[in-house]
Amino acid sequence: MILLVGSTTVAAMLPAPEATATPQAAGSYVLTATGTGSDYAPTFTGNGYLGVRVPPAGQGYAGGTVPAQSEVAGFYAQPSGQPQQRANIPTWSTFTFTDGGQDFGGGAGTMTGWRQQLNLHDGSVTTTARWTAPNGHVTDVRYEVFTDRNQAHVATVRLSLTPEWSGTATVTDLIDGTPADETTEVSKGWDAAHRQDWETVRTTGLGIVAGLASTVEPGPNVNATATPVDQDASQSVGQRFAFPVSARDTYTLTKYVGVTTSQDTSAPGPSARRQSAAAASAGFDAVSGENTAAWATLWADRVDILGNPTLATEVNASEFYLWSSTRDGVNWSISPAGLSSNGYDGHIFWDAETWMYPTLLAQHPDLAVGMDNYRYERLGAAQAHATQTGFTGARFPWESALDGTEQIPPPVSVNSEGLYEQHITADVALAQWQYYLATGDKTWLRTRGWPVLSGAATFWAGRAVPGANGGYHLDNVTGPDEENPDVNDEAYTNVAAAATLRMATEAARVLGIGAPASWATIANGLAPRYDASTDTHPEFAGYAGQLVKQADVTMLQYPWAYPMSPGTAQHDIDYYVPRSDPGGPSMDDAINTIDTAALGSPGCSSYVYTQRSIEPFMRDAFDQFSETRTGGAFTFMTGIGGFLQEFLYGYSGLRWTGGGVSLDPSLAGGVGGVVLHGLAWHGSRFTVSIGPRTTQVSLDSGASVPVKVGSHTASVAAGHPLTVPTRRPDRTPTTDLARCQPATASTAQPGADPLAAVDGSPATDWQPTQIASSLTVPLTHPATINSATLVWGRQWPGPPGPNIPPPPGPVTILRATDYRLVTSMDGRNWTVVAQVHGRTTGTQDTLTFTPATARYVGIQITGATAQTPPMLEELTVP
């Protein structure tokens, strides 16, 4: 049931400090898997420096589709003839319980009551089960793994055993080199007296050294000494503990891990040993408590979703995963899979600045600035890249890794982005400018932001080619739509380049530095193309309406704020959404949510876009994003970043300005409220609580914050919250009796829910999983009706191969060929009022029939074109 609450169209601010959406806990913070079926994928946890994926056994390494790898930030290798890539470190979490020569989790024996839980509040992954070993022994086993948020170089594994038998148990502490295929062993050793083992490994090609150490502290009733194991196994080191156990007693052993690399210290081996020993000396309670406290500090500034527990939990999980891949003081940016794996070789793309960065900036600028620092520290490489490719200024590479040089994998015939996808230089510049707007840190702008901004502006000024009538052009570029590469006057790139020139000019003004007058001239001459016949922006010169990979033109509105009429903005959305590749990434619909919320498009399509942005991409028990509907990078931090921006910048309308913040809050059914805790502006903290009717802005700490809503600006000070109307486009008056009503269907594809058929948008659609299907819509009230209009969807052909643009046709109409329109007063007894049979052409059916009094309208489909479930874009009942 979609909850639709009253609305208001008042534009002025309300003086009364009325509380609306109260800051309460929303969704779950403990995610649980009770089986390893199709909805299971091993989850990961991290502290922003270390990342580890935990397999069903609760510890150790496991291969498979989603291998349980261990990562450390900045640990890059370069195999011969290949680009730089982040290397796996040996798996440090291995802590194996063995009984009768068989390992728990190894497949032998019988497992009952298996459960794995991820606690988002402290980052711990706990696995419990009752194991009956092949020898008949029954043991309750519990593992808890976490990376220490308080101490970047520390991780912990705790094992508890409760046997139903008496005898000898064996536990092996291992640093396992099995998955470390881009490193070689340097040294290893054991200290049996202190129950510590350690090793150092070096990456191929680049020679970065990692030190790993493990110290085991047995519980008071564990009588065991350490015996070295794996003395000859390359990149592995371990120690084994055998000890007597008695039935129904519990035995606990804790493994304290230290990991350090030569990026952090000149002696990573000894440093790791010290980190491990110090954590063991402090003890589990102290380490665990400090870890939980550090996580609590992050969680204080979060996003709460009210009235939709499922969505709220997905937001909680997404925040956790993104935070797990970055930390204050670690100037490594975030790759598409973060620290969950070395997906995309751990490279840094536009994903970092465009998708993840704004999410962090809003509430955790101390985390976001590390991504800016990463680019600043590689500015020299960007300048060299510009020079080497025939340009001036700074040109940032499409794929960056250790040193900021271009690291895109060959061959160019497949991966041409390194040649043409130059908009990343503008994406980097935007992030730099956004940091200044959000923090007001003029010293940072002068010393770090300005060098990057001016270098990027110089690049675009030299890259643009003058044309007729004072215009400028950018030829031979690829936009975010990589399925249409190497084009001229690509819309996103033109707008982003012009914005970079304007941002740099403004930064120069703020700093009292002279900027070249040509920057403004070129910026004014760079514009996207415009087609008056469709009132849309063609994606590039010669664009013929074909499929696009992902959001491109729709991003002119957000984040680039390119000025256009609301009608043009809406037409761009309605034109490009149906043409977006269904095999593309989730961020398309994150942008559609934000754009639609800003436009206030009548209906509830902003919420439908939110559903589309998550349902096809997040289906495992631990709410992890996949890159596409069928796979790709996992856990996909890029998708997470886009998803979270829907709430931080979409429903709130939040935008940073140098003189304050701008808000334009809205809701559209399906979400009872959004609370943005601890938003940061110029050192102050404030909370935005978006309720069904009104939105409250309250100051948490610091100086007052200027807040602009519409044409009004108010200063939000301590004890004086501001209350403004919440826009409700889903309550915009309409003659359509079906709009935004709680539609239901026999089946629906993920992200193509029945609400999409009545959300007021011709760009979204309900698509069942099979042709024989039905849709039911309650009308706003019982009414006598005599017509209905149905708009069916279309499917564009995909690209025939790498770097070959998709053809504009043939376009397949995915419509119902045979269906009945039925009405009902009670939702149980139905009357057929219209029938369609054998209709294979056309995308719109307008049905007229003898007037009927109805409370419900239904569609019963029995046939469709292309032997494919149809797509119903919109049903209207006047």
Image (spheres, rainbow, N blue to C red):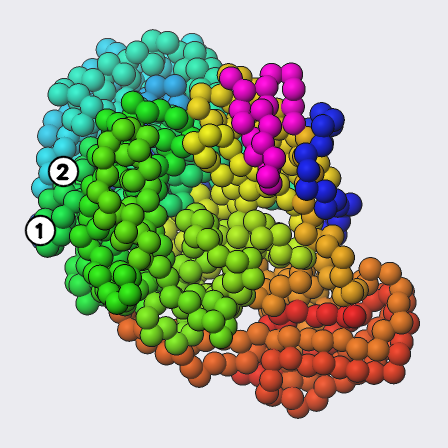
Report the residue at 14% width, 33% height from top: 208
Left or right: residue 642 versus residue 739 is left
Visible in this render: residue 482?
no
> Looking at the image, which residue is at 76% across and 65% down?
736
Is 480 rendered above or below residue 164? below
Region in magenta: 703-722
Residue at 20% across / 17% down in the picture?
271
On the question of residue 716 being in view, the answer is: yes
Q: Is residue 2 left or right of residue 250?
A: right
Q: Secondary structure at mark 1?
A: helix
Query: Which of disc 1 and disc 2 is earlier in sequence?
Result: 2
Q: Amino acid type of disc 2? A: Gly
Q: Is residue 275 left or right of residue 41?
A: left
| For residue 85, above or below residue 485 | above
- Is residue 564 shown above or below 382? below
Residue at the disc numbered 1:
388
Q: Residues within 10 Å of mark 1 (few under 14, many from 20)?
A: few
